[in-house]
Image (cartoon, coloured by chain):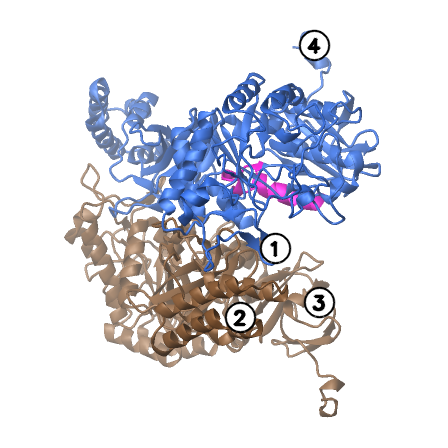
Chain colours: A blue, B brown
Amino acid sequence: MTTKRSDGRRRVIIEGITPQVDCGLFPAKRTAGDEVRVEADIFTDGHDAITASLLAHREGSDEWTEIPMHPLVNDRWEASFRVAELGRYGYKVQGWVDHFETWRRDLLKRIKAESDASVDYLIGAELVAEAATRALGGDAVWLRERAAVLRSAKTASELRIHATDPMLHELVLRYPDKRFATESNPELTIVVEPVRARFSSWYEFFPRSSSEKPGAHGTFADCEKRLPYIAEMGFNVVYLPPIHPIGRTFRKGRNNNPEAQPGDCGSPWAIGAKEGGHKEILSDLGTVEDFKRFVAKAGDLGMSVALDIAFQVAPDHPYVKVHETWFKKRPDGTIQYAENPPKKYQDIYPFNFETEDWEGMWVELKSVFVYWIGMGVTIFRVDNPHTKAFPFWEWVIAEIKRDHPEVLFLAEAFTRPKIMYRLAKLGFSQSYTYFPWRNGKHEITTYLTELAQTPVREFFRANQWPNTPDILTEFLQMGGRPGFVIRLLLAATMGANYGIYGPPFELQENRPVKHGSEEYLNSEKYEIRHWDLARPDSLREFIAQVNGVRNENQALQNDWSLKFHSTDNDQLICYSKESDDRSNLLVMAVNLDPHHSQSGFITLPLDELEIPQDRSFEAEDLLSGERYLWQGLRNYVELNPSIRSGHILKIHRRMRVETDFEYFL
Amino acid sequence: MTTKRSDGRRRVIIEGITPQVDCGLFPAKRTAGDEVRVEADIFTDGHDAITASLLAHREGSDEWTEIPMHPLVNDRWEASFRVAELGRYGYKVQGWVDHFETWRRDLLKRIKAESDASVDYLIGAELVAEAATRALGGDAVWLRERAAVLRSAKTASELRIHATDPMLHELVLRYPDKRFATESNPELTIVVEPVRARFSSWYEFFPRSSSEKPGAHGTFADCEKRLPYIAEMGFNVVYLPPIHPIGRTFRKGRNNNPEAQPGDCGSPWAIGAKEGGHKEILSDLGTVEDFKRFVAKAGDLGMSVALDIAFQVAPDHPYVKVHETWFKKRPDGTIQYAENPPKKYQDIYPFNFETEDWEGMWVELKSVFVYWIGMGVTIFRVDNPHTKAFPFWEWVIAEIKRDHPEVLFLAEAFTRPKIMYRLAKLGFSQSYTYFPWRNGKHEITTYLTELAQTPVREFFRANQWPNTPDILTEFLQMGGRPGFVIRLLLAATMGANYGIYGPPFELQENRPVKHGSEEYLNSEKYEIRHWDLARPDSLREFIAQVNGVRNENQALQNDWSLKFHSTDNDQLICYSKESDDRSNLLVMAVNLDPHHSQSGFITLPLDELEIPQDRSFEAEDLLSGERYLWQGLRNYVELNPSIRSGHILKIHRRMRVETDFEYFL
């Protein structure tokens, strides 16, 4: 952040503006309706008073809103502006030495010390006369007259009354002398996205397995029938793996067998066949019309459909012939397949982002998004964005969002931390995280605190998944039913955005393809599965209950309020979340051990949570309905995983007491 | 920090370069001969190998030095360059996808898995042939031939030998393909200053009190006689309050009396009288020639002379008439004196940095520095820089250092933290600190850690003063002789730059003008004092001993190695410092209580300090000469302030043992 120095008389310094991502290179993220709190260090030399404004506008508009900033402590100032609409807002900070305010402040001190002299009023008269030259209409007349009074009034009391008149203060404030104002530079940016970018509950399933008839290939019509089941569980995003024609060359068989057997349906991520590519629908699933009907039905149930965008092709994708320069050719004339030596993925060709025709390729890839937006899709889960050139993402997301600011992008980049963060900075609305592998109290606390309480939160929005089709964690493999309950509770109450891959999740599918692997046995990635959704041991009702709590409690609809609280048992984790207005406060306590009862004391920072220390307060378990009467910092918790693994406690900060009765009022 | 995106094929990302001050708006600071360690996050999409370089040059020169960067962990890379000369260096980071290295790395994996195929060698041949087109002379010929061999060799073993030849690797590395290299932007800057900017021992005294004859006004000739006394104490900077004619209008009397009595000599900071202003010498002190002789004599004794620059004027300063527009005129025609209502400082007129003629004023103020540089002065202690416009300091320091990179500036800004840091960013080489008021273990540890171990250290160089003519702290007032010893020990061993105001310091002058004040009684600011330097209770020998330790131990000549270690007694503070090469390690233990013996265990992080845990090591007290045999993390310390208040322990990491004898070797 820099300040212009076009004139040596610009004496105000503006530093350290927040929010600010990488020196303003990237926008900070907010959702529609948010108050954006801007802070900055603002000061000047010497003892003069300063005034500062926050200036905000819709990007591209000349209409700026000016909001007065207020000093906090240690030369830090703040002001807020509301971002009501989707899209981009710009903001900057102005500060200037305020000679009128300096005069007024000093005059008040002089009057108090009875050392005010006539020259002090003459100085004021000059400042008021100057303000009059900047003022309009009646204000100018009023100020000129007041200047005259300050020059001519005879008695000290008269002078004091006119000089300290609040009306004078207000009118001069209205016409500040900004000749030597400092303005921050560069302009900073906020990207405003739909609320669903901040609060979303995802349910992923394979359309291929949606038929009620065992063995039959599911269709969009079957998927439609599945929607009420998902909606009843309280989800608001339905996410489908790729729905395009699947390559036949080097098609993968069941359990990732390099040789497919006749009838094997292959991996949906091996996109493209002679029927078409990324803008085509696998005929087994149905038609474009079927898909649109599915999207509309989901919408009727309050759910958005998220589509998987995987920018890679099967060898028989039409691109391979039409745009052969987009792929790396080897000296033997073959096309370079994906590999991580010595492993080979011959069913997949990656795009070559160093192609001479990179601009043509970018435009075509963008058109894939645009095509599905035309079909009603507003959310894209992007497969492995970290294996495509970063400049492409920055460009394509900005391009799409310029015309469709409602569209969201989820980055599926399970890779190194700096890369995950960079993708978020480039524009992805949400990102997968390391949550699947954070199981212990310390590692959960450290990681989630980094995401929720450091400047990372300005650009990186976590989406917490206990499982995915690629990730059946060891914890789920070994934790039994409580393992699934624990991971769901953690994901759904720590993450305002979370998701599960079902039905394997609710049916607690936990068999890996082999010991030490995180791949599912008989994964739907390579075959059709039939799921008995009505199984009595399904977690569907528990999930519905948890999502119900999420939907009804604003505390769980943001990540920034997440705070961890100490417990005296390392198997017990405790944390709280609050709504922005602090009216909705939830405290979660979870037993991280899927096998044993754990108990201990949790310590809540009552002052910070605005709970009176000297009174009882009520902790109402929103899952069991039980109500606990708690008092003081330390309270006891005991959780038996065979009964329940966690509490979601709604805190009623204050219990009624006798003084609340009307005859006490 | 941004990266250029002129081409979508620039796939490497460069982020988070350090050192970097405020997004590159200000230079980082180093001293001549330093190795500048540069780090950056560098990565690309996918699995390709990358290569990165640090590019450095003298600012303004086209000759760039390219230094290969090395990966650390977590996508962080590093490289260093040496700044041998005074002045400014620029640096930037380049990174590019290295297709040859990717091929080579993957080939080695393939060979290991015995899956290398002839097409792999053909790909290599292409890459080598491309390198040949970039190569020069014999290298080009060699590479062309090698490409041919990789195309034509018949056996696998032949191919493997030629492909993995280290010579091939080295030659291709020499001619990298930087077509799509990413380059960091903007260029970052280092300001290189003399070593004295990092390591200096200041002694301030009033020339007016330097006469051996009580009551007589000291002269530069007297000051000259004082120099050996100062040099023997081991100081290397002699700092004089202003030496200019002192105003007569509103001259201050003794003890800051608003009415001067006849014969009162006034405050040296009330600069200017009819005889002249900032480029004139008070005639009582002598002539320009006398001053030059004084400076030369100091130089002969290894000491620099630091002059006080106070940009303010007494009412009778010639500027007031010649440049009346540089001062604020009040409506009654009088000039605005300094004030902080209701306090008035009528003996001082501040410059008006909003004057129309600000450019003319800047040029004249700059010429004050230039004048004294001409007299041999290379260090300026700038009085209250925070009451002059910040843009002026940025300009004037850059201007002076362009022609005189050897010149140092010390900012005397005892003000709010952000302002102190800003002044340092703008170019001040050193800064006064809050050290005088940090007396407890926690507050010392927190503050000094902020200065030594956070990014603040890139731009802010502390200069630690236990006292100044304006600051006789309550600790010194109440701590007796041990109070002075403690504060000297702390300043001189925590701060590579430190200073004292003498003779009051060594003579332990501790009487304030009144209870609750930090002003000295009968302050030299307003009168001549006579000091008995030979008093037997003087701390001069102790100071000489401490400065001797500083001069002989590189550990005390830097601030960046300062680390605090835990003690089990809050009155005992323990910290260590090391030389850059780690060969010189000192551990300090100080009793912060001036009145009582304190004892306890200190815990040293032996691993971090590279002291073997399983052996004894020697702690040699450089003040007392005592030697302690220590072992393990915890060792006992007892300090009686009537004997000594602190240890400066030189650690001999390893004691000789029997296996060091030659017959064991």
Pinpoint residue B177: horizontal percent, then vertical percent.
Answer: 39, 63
Identify which amino acid the numbered label 4 is placed on. Phe
Identify which amino acid the numbered label 2 is placed on. Leu
Pinpoint residue A624: horizontal percent, then vertical percent.
Answer: 77, 22
In the rendered image, residues at marks 4 and 2 fall on the same chain: no
Residue A598 in view: yes
Q: Which residue is drawn at 73% across and 13% down?
A: A658
Question: SS for tag 1?
Answer: strand
Identify which amino acid the numbered label 1 is placed on. Lys
Chain label for disc 4: A
Query: How many residues crowd mark 2 within 10 Å: few (<14), some (14–19), many (20+)?
Result: many
Pinpoint residue A594: horizontal percent, then vertical percent.
Answer: 80, 38
Residue A444 belongs to the span the image colors magenta: yes
Which mark is first along the chain, 4 or 1? 1
Chain label for disc 3: B
Q: What stretch is highlighted in magenta?
A: A440-462
Question: SS for tag 2?
Answer: helix
The residue that label 2 is drawn on is: B556
Towards the viewer: B568 or B459: B459
Chain label for disc 1: A
The residue that label 1 is drawn on is: A343
In the rendered image, residues at marks 1 and 4 fall on the same chain: yes
